[in-house]
Image (spheres, grey):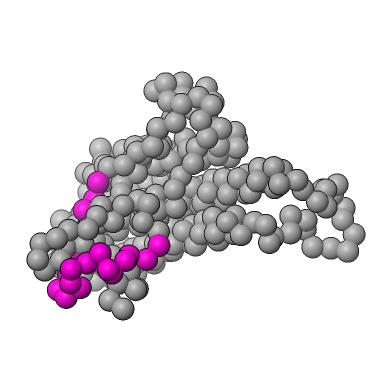
């Protein structure tokens, strides 16, 4: 059985590696979805045939404008659906790795054999994201309140993957409609004279500095808010680019929140990570790290 200092070192190294690997997942999903969404906007310049002198697949060399537009939409949905899959499976893998530390550590400090954790770990790995997060809350008090977001993300992924983004009865049988829910961020810029400018979900391009009375001492305020999109049978499931950013950001927050919870949980057991200081809720720090538009102060 390891001494407390050795255990602290091993647990700290394991957690930091798991968290860093976890944080890479939503960043990767964001970049891959960005490639797909941005490429779909340049679709007229992209060859729809795979490279090769001899084509082994019977794909028409030329497409009508209508067929090309359909293919563009399918490509965008395919990229977003795969991005959602990456987020969901990445969070599942992150939670599985985290639980491999939580379960045996809990048993160790209760004076029980950590070998008994094997069955609990195998059972946990069969859960979806919702059930994993629910189990962590009920069993260990790790409250994130994020499970329902990932449940709706899974439903949206299924619609994009299996029904090409056309909402069907399988998508709406639970509520009568398909609802994609996520944790978004409201952003407003406040000038020194108190004038406020709201940065909406549709704000993709540069902010027009001419609309500002002054750019000196302007402050950016960010607030987490609940967002949702509702779709009925036959609707096309379209997710705006800014919403995709927020969904990826939500995944980063979920990982950071669980990092905080497990570190503080271990502190209660006497494992003094982070110099024995509890971690604060990552929401505030993440909001402070939101970036100013590059052109704002030009």
What percent of the width, then of the height, locates residue 274? Answer: 20, 69
Q: Is residue 101 left or right of residue 27?
A: left
| Among the 4 quarters of the image, the one containing residue 135 | top left
Q: Is residue 79 above or below residue 42?
A: above
| Among the 4 quarters of the image, the one containing residue 64 | top right
Magenta run includes residue 288: no
Magenta run includes residue 219: yes
Q: Is residue 19 left or right of residue 276?
A: right
Image quarter in which the C terminus is found: bottom left
Q: Is residue 163 above or below residue 283?
A: above
What percent of the width, then of the height, locates residue 85? Answer: 51, 47
Of residue 11 and residue 241, the one placed in the foreground of this image is 241
What percent of the width, then of the height, locates residue 33? Answer: 52, 56
Visible in this render: residue 89?
no
Q: Is residue 230 left or right of residue 190?
A: right
Q: Is residue 9 left or right of residue 279?
A: right
Which residue is drawn at the image coordinates 46% and 26% (left, top)?
Answer: 232
What percent of the width, then of the height, locates residue 137? Answer: 26, 41
Span colored in magenta? 205-225
Q: Is residue 46 above or below residue 254?
A: below
Which residue is drawn at the image coordinates 46% and 58% (left, top)?
Answer: 30
Of residue 225 and residue 199, the one placed in the foreground of this image is 199
| Among the 4 quarters of the image, the one containing residue 181 | top left
Visible in this render: residue 235?
yes
């Amino acid at each position: 059985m390891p001494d407390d200092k050795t255990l602290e070192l091993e647990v700290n190294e394991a957690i930091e590696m798991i968290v860093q690997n976890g944080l890479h997942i939503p960043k990767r999903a964001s970049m891959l979805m960005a490639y797909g969404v941005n490429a779909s906007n340049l679709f007229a310049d992209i060859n729809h045939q795979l490279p090769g002198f001899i084509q082994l697949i019977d794909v028409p060399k030329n497409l009508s404008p209508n067929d090309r537009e359909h293919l563009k939409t399918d490509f965008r949905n395919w990229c977003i659906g795969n991005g959602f899959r990456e987020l969901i499976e990445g969070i599942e893998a992150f939670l599985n790795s985290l639980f491999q530390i939580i379960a045996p550590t809990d048993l160790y400090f209760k004076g029980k054999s950590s070998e008994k954790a094997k069955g609990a770990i195998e059972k946990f790995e069969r859960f979806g994201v919702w059930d994993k997060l629910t189990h962590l809350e009920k069993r260990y008090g790790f409250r994130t309140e994020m499970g329902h977001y990932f449940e709706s993300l899974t439903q949206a992924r299924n619609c994009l993957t299996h029904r090409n983004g056309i909402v069907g009865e399988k998508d709406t049988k639970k509520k009568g409609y398909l609802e994609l829910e996520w944790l978004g961020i409201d952003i407003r810029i406040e000038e020194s004279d108190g004038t406020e400018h709201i940065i909406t979900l549709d704000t993709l391009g540069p902010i027009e500095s001419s609309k500002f009375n002054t750019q000196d001492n302007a402050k950016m305020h960010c607030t987490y808010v609940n967002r949702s999109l509702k779709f009925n049978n036959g609707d096309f499931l379209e997710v705006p680019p800014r919403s995709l950013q927020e969904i990826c950001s939500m995944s980063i927050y979920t990982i950071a929140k669980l990092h905080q919870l497990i570190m503080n949980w271990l502190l209660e057991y006497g494992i003094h990570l982070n110099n024995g200081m509890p971690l604060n809720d990552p929401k505030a720090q993440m909001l402070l790290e939101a970036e100013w538009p590059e052109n704002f102060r030009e």
